[in-house]
């Protein structure tokens, strides 16, 4: 009598791209779309950089409640529930914009959105680690980072273009951005329903065992993380790998939108959206998938240095753009494509390093701690970026960003990578 066939594994392409696209959208809304929206509504660069950088805080402190996601309910439950909450928060932003205190009210809703999104990230990353066998995690790290970044470019691209188009039709950026946020809210409600049906139900996705002493269980998660070998160098790497990018990211969009007389490129909102939504997305997809694929062939240890150079070298693009101020949209698009390819390629190494560091007991919470330090490394430098640019101007600011890559290289030199980690099995 023939044995029964093994159950068919769920197709990971049905949920990894959509899950990480949904993980990226709230982040880009808070970090990038809010920047463009406030710029359109005439808020100053200094206020934009300062207040939107504070919105990083939920991603920085999410490790404080990450054990709760491990201890209560399944990761699948958290993912679906929080996507519905995020949908409600996005729709709520639209309601705040027509009011007289729109800046304060929208920031308050963005805080709620940020906390919900940070918790969703904990659950989604933990679900990935549980649902994917280790030998496939490295191969798909480029895919997940690519779709996460595609979400950010969809915000910088399609959604910014849509806001510009609607503003042109209605003659009012407030109404235009309200429509954009209503559309986003509806999208997330549909996403929550979609993932309810397509996410697999791995056997390992269940609440972590509890001793009955919640505080002791909670504290033990952090103690185990900070006892990992080489944790000091690891934390330095997590904080500094994106030190230069964290500052550039805050000012790239204002630089593209600001007039040429003050050092910007003078693009329209629609042009910025078109550039990031076409060549930006294509370059990022190629870079991200190529990065994960190459790591799976050669391993993280061998590819780490080429990838950190790929991540930081394209910052020279912005020095050239600020000096030359080219008028050709083709030239601008080509240079931004180089920057996006380098980011996609280099970020795969950073994500895989966090997976390596988080392995072992309580890996969901430990991965959340890693991403919390990553967010802190983005938040603190980003807070000062607007002030630095106001003092230096765009040319000198982007030269400073190049200098700011030095700590990233220094931190990389101090960490240790397990031989063969990330390399696929023969």
Image (cartoon, grey):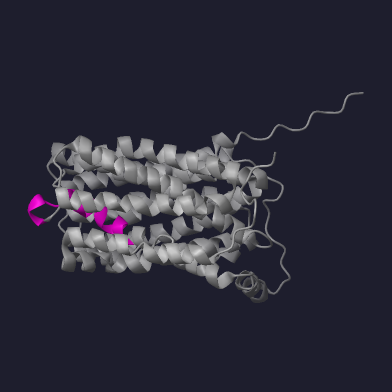
Indicate the quadrant containing the C terminus: top left, top right, bottom left or bottom right: top right
Residue drawn at x 49%, y 62% is 412
Instruction: Tell me if residue 185 comes above or below residue 45 in the rendering.
Output: above
Q: Is residue 402 visible?
A: yes
Residue 285 on the magenta span: no
Residue drawn at x 27%, y 38% is 334
Q: Looking at this view, is 231 or 130 the one in front?
A: 231
Q: Looking at this view, is 286 or 223 the one in front?
A: 286
Instruction: Tell me if residue 257 comes above or below residue 284 in the rendering.
Output: below
Task: Give the main secondary structure, helix, strand or loop, of the magenta stretch.
Answer: helix
Residue 256 on the magenta span: yes
Q: Measured from the top left, where is residue 196 in percent x and y?
A: 56, 41
- Residue most toward the top? 1
Q: Looking at this view, is 402 or 186 the one in front?
A: 402
Q: Measured from the top left, where is residue 304 in percent x and y?
A: 51, 53
Residue 400 placement: quadrant:
bottom left
Query: In screen coordinates, is 50 left or right of 340?
Result: left
Residue 133 placement: quadrant:
top right
Q: Measured from the top left, where is residue 373 in percent x and y?
A: 48, 66
Residue drawn at x 55%, y 58% is 354
Indicate the quadrant containing the N terminus: top left, top right, bottom left or bottom right: top right
- Residues in magenta, as a range: 247-262
Q: Is residue 133 visible?
A: no
């Amino acid at each position: 009598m023939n044995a029964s066939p093994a159950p068919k594994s769920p197709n990971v392409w049905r949920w990894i791209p959509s899950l990480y696209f949904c993980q990226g959208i709230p982040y880009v809304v808070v970090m990038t779309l809010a920047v463009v929206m406030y710029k359109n509504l005439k808020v100053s660069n200094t206020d934009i950089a300062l207040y939107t950088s504070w919105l990083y805080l939920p991603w920085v402190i999410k490790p404080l409640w990450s054990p709760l996601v491990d201890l209560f309910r399944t990761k699948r439950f958290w993912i679906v529930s929080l996507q519905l909450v995020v949908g409600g928060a996005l729709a709520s932003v639209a309601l705040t914009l027509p009011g007289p205190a729109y800046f304060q009210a929208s920031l308050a809703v963005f805080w709620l959105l940020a906390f919900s999104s940070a918790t969703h990230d904990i659950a989604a990353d933990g679900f990935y680690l549980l649902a994917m066998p280790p030998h496939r995690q490295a191969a798909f790290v480029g895919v997940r980072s690519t779709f996460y970044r595609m979400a950010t470019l969809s915000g910088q691209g399609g959604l910014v273009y849509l806001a510009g188009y609607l503003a042109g039709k209605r003659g009012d950026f407030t109404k235009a951005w309200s429509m954009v946020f209503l559309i986003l809210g509806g999208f997330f409600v549909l996403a929550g329903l979609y993932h309810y049906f397509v996410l697999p139900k791995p056997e390992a996705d269940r609440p972590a065992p509890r001793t009955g002493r919640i505080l002791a269980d909670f504290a033990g998660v952090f103690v185990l993380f900070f006892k990992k070998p080489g944790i000091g160098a690891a934390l330095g790497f997590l904080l500094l790998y994106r030190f230069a990018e964290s500052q550039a990211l805050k000012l790239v969009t204002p630089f593209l939108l600001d007039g040429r007389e003050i050092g910007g490129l003078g693009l329209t909102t629609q042009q910025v959206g078109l550039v990031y939504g076409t060549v930006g997305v294509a370059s990022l997809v190629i870079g991200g998938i190529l990065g994960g694929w190459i790591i799976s062939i050669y391993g993280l240890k061998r590819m780490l240095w080429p990838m950190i150079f790929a991540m930081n070298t394209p910052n020279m693009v912005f020095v050239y753009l600020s000096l030359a101020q080219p008028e050709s949209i083709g030239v601008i698009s080509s240079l931004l494509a180089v920057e996006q390819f380098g980011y996609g390629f280099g970020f795969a190494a950073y994500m895989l390093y966090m997976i390596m560091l988080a392995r072992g007991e309580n890996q969901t919470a430990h991965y959340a701690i890693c991403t919390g330090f990553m967010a802190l490394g983005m938040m603190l430098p980003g807070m000062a970026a607007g002030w630095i640019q106001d003092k230096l101007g765009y040319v000198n600011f982007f030269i400073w960003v190049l200098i700011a890559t030095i700590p990233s290289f220094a931190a990389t030199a101090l960490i240790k990578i397990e031989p063969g980690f990330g390399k696929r099995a023969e």
